[in-house]
Amino acid sequence: MDPSSDRSYERERVEKGHLPRLSPEFYQGRAFVHWTLTVEQRATGWLTPAFHEQWRLTLLHACARYQIACPAYVLMPDHIHLLGLGLDDHSDQRQAVEFLRKHLRAVLSPATWQNQAHDQVLRDSQRERGAFQTVAQYILDNPVRAGLVSRRSDYTFLGGCVAGYPDLSVYRDDYWERFWRIYNRLVENESEAATRSRS
């Protein structure tokens, strides 16, 4: 089964009280997924510079452990958006998001996460660079649309994360050019390593 194909995204049957999920393979490998982590009852007051710092550290560990890149995230007062891109055949974004939720519970307290994160697996047409960057820009512009700031550059609770590239910044004019160059290099390196291990 090819999770990235443009076929109908039929959801699995799940227990009552849970959001519908695609089968696990849709979140594995080189999937592109838009995740939304919502705080229970839309609680606010937890979003601070200290929380953002812990988020960045935990996201870095999740990216390294589960072989994903996060080109865009934004922390809003009652929820979080992030984009995840799998880097190799072993990437698992569902596990990465559960890792994030688990390791951020203490710093989020007394607020708690909603029962589960919401996801949108991007289709082939949404993975093309122009379309994908439109999705990413929409995520990064959330604070402007919400009236929190007048310009994205004035909002400090957003960014991206690619393990091994601490100077990669969404605030730079050449961000997307640099991001795609790094992403392509990482994917090619993983493909070459997998080929060598099979031979």
Image (tube, rainbow, N blue to C red):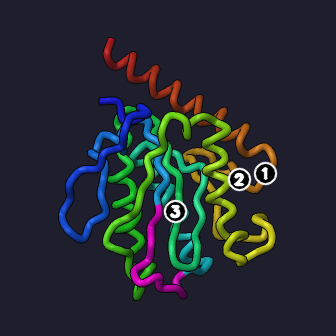
Q: Position of residue 6 (x, y in %)?
A: 43, 33
Disc 2 target residue: 169
Disc 1 target residue: 172
Location of the C terminus by quadrant is top left
Residue type at mark 1: give it. Answer: Arg
Q: Is residue 140 above or below residue 126?
A: below
Q: Position of residue 165 (x, y in %)?
A: 62, 46
| Quadrant housing residue 184 | top right
Q: What is the span of residues highlighted in magenta in the rendered image?
A: 36-46
Give the Cα separation between the discs numbered 1 and 3.
21 Å
Q: Are marks 1 and 3 in contact (CB under 8 Å)?
A: no
Task: Based on the picture, tell me whether residue 16 belongs to the magenta stretch.
Answer: no
Q: Is residue 158 above or below residue 125?
A: below
Label 3 crowd bin: few (<14), some (14–19), many (20+), radius 10 Å: few
Residue 188 relative to residue 130: left or right: left
Q: Are marks 2 and 1 in contact (CB under 8 Å)?
A: yes
In this rendering, the label closer to the viewer, 1 or 3: 1
Dot label at residue 198: none
Residue type at mark 2: give it. Answer: Ser
Q: Nearer the viewer, residue 113 or 55?
A: 113
Q: Position of residue 24 (x, y in %)?
A: 28, 45
Disc 3 target residue: 57
Residue 117 relative to residue 134: left or right: left
